[in-house]
Amino acid sequence: MTAQLPLKSISDPAAQRVLALLSDAGYQALFVGGTVRNALLGTAVTDFDIATDALPTEVLALAEDAGMRSVPTGVAHGTVTLVVNSAPFEVTTFRRDIETDGRHAKVTFSKDVAEDARRRDFTMNALYADATGAVIDPLGGLIDLRARRVRFVGVPEDRIREDYLRILRFFRFSAQYADPAGGMDADGLAGCAAHLDGLARLSAERVWSELKKLLGAADPAWVVGAMDASGVLGACLPGTSAEGLAPLIHAEAELGLAPDPLRRFVALGGETPEAKLRISRSEARYFEHMRSAVASADGPLALGYTLGSAAARDVLALRFALLQSRFSQSDLAKIDQGARAVFPVRAVDLRDGLQGPQIGEALEKLKTIWLAEGCAPDKATLLRRL
């Protein structure tokens, strides 16, 4: 099977300059992986990864002679980064693994593109293309790509034992690229389920990075369901469940909400993410606020006032997913009303004699009244209620 990349997808002058640097010196120079995959799928090509039979030292020497900035990013693994017009391009020598430990590999360099392809994770990532866009397909990845099928290169368990992160990548790529009607590759699922213990060897940062990318897909519910059924979800995030994700995605569509991995993570339930993952402080605050707000008795008006319109809509969507609590257009109007409202009473407005905690308690009492009455009472009316 043959294919041709759309020329506009690989016409970047800086990328073409890097290819020419290598090919003019007599080396193979090929776009690889996501560059080719995305171009064939008609999605945006944001990174240009390049594979070559030139050794890293040869790439560095060519760059120096051409006055091109180079960074020996990972010479031991065959990767050199060339910088053209401030844009970085990873150039990696064809290679094969000679030793793996479940996360990292020792490699030896190769002159054979097919040998390089056999060490990659999925067939749709084992595609190459030259400067003209002509696709080179050593392993039949074009058939899988056109069928929107995510399939491991060779025996799934062999690829997984080389790098256990591939378990999460299998689900993430399925969420991003696979056809739900075709389901997930059965051999791949079985291989992932057989190696759950390997997930414990992954860093929290890498797990969280993959999960965020997965949950940011347009509709990952069917894939997360497969993760749950295979035991992968529970191994990564004890106590979580895929049950609330499909209703959440339905609510997102009703509310016009863009996919958000943090919102969707809340819908999975389970332990607080800090206990298992390396998340940022802002992400931790979001989880805390969402879980508290979903469980609270605050109505749409109060949610809009305390959280703002965007976060309050997140709460409505999550309540629908987790508590089967329905919402209406009037709820959205109340959220917006609350978000615009300004509480009219300040500490200086309170009568003399209140001190310390009493001031805070009085303000909270009046705020509760104000919200309960639709943010309608003015300052004078509220102060008479003390």
Image (cartoon, helix red, strand yellow):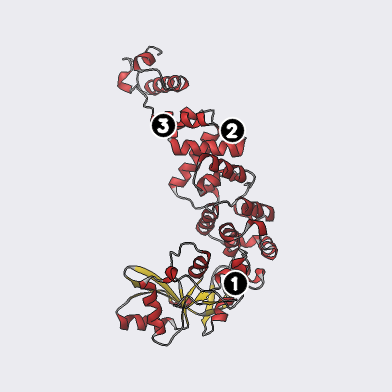
Q: Is residue 234 above or below residue 248?
A: below
Q: Is residue 307 above or below residue 200?
A: above
Specify few, some or many for label 1: CA neighbours under 10 Å numbering under 14, 14-19, or 20 or more: many
Rounded to the nearest angstrom, the CA distance separating label 3 from label 1 is 51 Å
Three-letter code, disc 3 = Ala
Identify the image quadrant of the C terminus.
top left
Residue 325 rendering spot, x and y as whole percentages: 60, 33
Q: Would you say 57 lies left or right of 108 here?
A: left
Three-letter code, disc 1 = Gly
Q: Is residue 318 above or below residue 158?
A: above
- Kindly state the secondary structure of the residue where label 3 is placed: helix
In terms of sequence position, does the residue under pointer 1 or pointer 2 come before the other? 1
Specify few, some or many for label 2: CA neighbours under 10 Å numbering under 14, 14-19, or 20 or more: few
Residue 218 rendering spot, x and y as whole percentages: 54, 52
Residue 209 rendering spot, x and y as whole percentages: 50, 57
Asked whether the viewer can see residue 261, the reply is: yes
Tag 3–tag 2 contact (CB < 8 Å): no
Q: Which residue matches tag 2?
A: 326
Specify few, some or many for label 3: CA neighbours under 10 Å numbering under 14, 14-19, or 20 or more: many
Rounded to the nearest angstrom, the CA distance separating label 3 from label 2 is 20 Å
Residue at coordinates 49% horizontally, 73% vertically from top-left? 32
- Kindly state the secondary structure of the residue where label 2 is placed: loop
Tag 1–tag 2 contact (CB < 8 Å): no
Q: 105 or 51: nearer the eye?
A: 51
Residue 164 rendering spot, x and y as whole percentages: 59, 65
In terms of sequence position, does the residue under pointer 3 or pointer 1 come before the other? 1
- Kindly state the secondary structure of the residue where label 1 is placed: helix
Q: Which residue matches tag 3?
A: 339
Rounded to the nearest angstrom, the CA distance separating label 1 from label 2 is 45 Å
Residue at coordinates 43% horizontally, 29% vertically from top-left? 338
Corner quadrant of residue 72: bottom left
